[in-house]
Image (cartoon, helix red, strand yellow):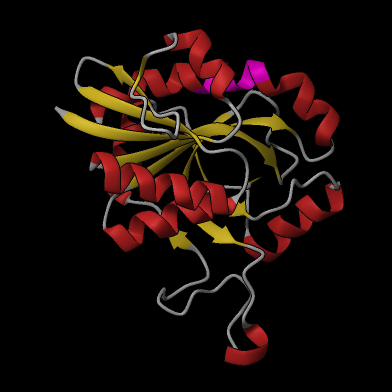
């Protein structure tokens, strides 16, 4: 049976509401085991931010030898045409706060071991996910350790990086998975539009996290 690691940043209440408490593995890190028809899902609440997300990803890979990592959750929109409640599949990520341009002469966001500024998500998983739900939009996610509340900052992420959405974990999860040669997938639902900011995030967070999980539930056994 396939083992899947599920990284949960701040949407853990929605997970409990949908699937219950699960089986507490009592590993000292709060990992909870859920069983689907085809998979064992090891869910870990990482907390917000790149460092927590990287640590949680590496832990699930090392401790439970998961074959795939999935991150679901809520995100901000960087374009006017994405509204609260729309769910997306991330096909590439840019770490917009990573910048070594002054010493290596490469664009902001570029890791030297990658040919482009954008970090590609596993194409096979993206294709499988969108085959299961053809209505899901494929997007670019700008990821960094800052909640993007300012509409102008969000719009700049679109203008500079072509980012449709922004979050605080995707770059860390993808980079960690790539280093371990473990594929990953990101299923994200917009909680706050370009001009919504923190107030819309708090109003929509629980509803949109539940919507994201409903779609994840339809996809996970098809991966």
Q: Residue at x 19, y 21 (%)?
A: 38
Q: Can you give x and y, in whole percent of width and height, for residue 184 in the image? A: 35, 45
Q: Residue at x 77, y 59 (%)?
A: 156
Quadrant of residue 157 within the rendered picture: bottom right
Foreground residue among 107 and 52: 52
Tell me where the magenta segment starts and ends, as one range.
206-212
Foreground residue among 96 and 159: 96
203 relative to 61 in the view: left or right: right
Q: Can you give x and y, in whole percent of width and height, for residue 101 in the image? A: 64, 84
Q: Residue at x 65, y 18 (%)?
A: 206
Relative vertical location of residue 17 with respect to residue 71 in this rendering, above or below: above
Q: Can you give x and y, in whole percent of width and height, for residue 18 in the image? A: 47, 10
The quadrant in which the N terminus is found is top left
Magenta portion: prevailing SS class = helix
Residue that sits furthest to the left in the current view:
1
Q: Can you give x and y, in whole percent of width and height, for residue 65 in the image? A: 23, 43
Relative vertical location of residue 42 with respect to residue 101 in this rendering, above or below: above
188 relative to 186 in the view: left or right: right
Relative vertical location of residue 46 with respect to residue 160 in this rendering, above or below: above
Asked if residue 148 lies in the magenta stretch, the reply is no
Foreground residue among 118 and 8: 8
68 relative to 87 in the view: left or right: left
Quadrant of residue 134 within the rendered picture: top left
């Amino acid at each position: 049976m396939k083992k899947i690691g599920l990284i949960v940043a701040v949407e853990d209440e929605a997970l409990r509401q949908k699937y219950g408490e699960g089986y507490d593995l009592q590993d000292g890190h709060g990992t909870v085991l859920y069983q689907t028809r085809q998979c064992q899902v090891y869910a870990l609440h990482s907390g917000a931010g790149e460092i927590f997300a990287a640590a949680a990803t590496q832990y699930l890979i090392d401790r439970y030898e998961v074959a795939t990592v999935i991150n679901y959750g809520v995100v901000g929109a960087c374009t006017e045409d994405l509204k609260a409640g729309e769910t997306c599949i991330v096909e590439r990520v840019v770490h917009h706060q990573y910048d070594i341009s002054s010493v290596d002469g490469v664009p902001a966001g570029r890791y030297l071991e990658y040919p482009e500024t954008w970090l590609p998500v596993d194409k096979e998983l993206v294709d499988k996910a969108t085959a299961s739900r053809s209505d899901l939009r494929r997007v670019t996610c700008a990821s960094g350790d800052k909640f993007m509340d300012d509409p102008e900052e969000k719009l700049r992420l679109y203008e500079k990086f072509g980012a449709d959405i922004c979050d605080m974990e995707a770059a860390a999860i993808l980079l960690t998975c790539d280093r371990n040669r473990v594929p990953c997938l990101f299923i994200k639902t917009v909680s706050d539009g370009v001009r919504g900011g923190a107030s819309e995030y708090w109003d929509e967070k629980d509803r949109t996290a539940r919507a994201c999980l409903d779609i994840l539930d339809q996809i996970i056994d098809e991966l």
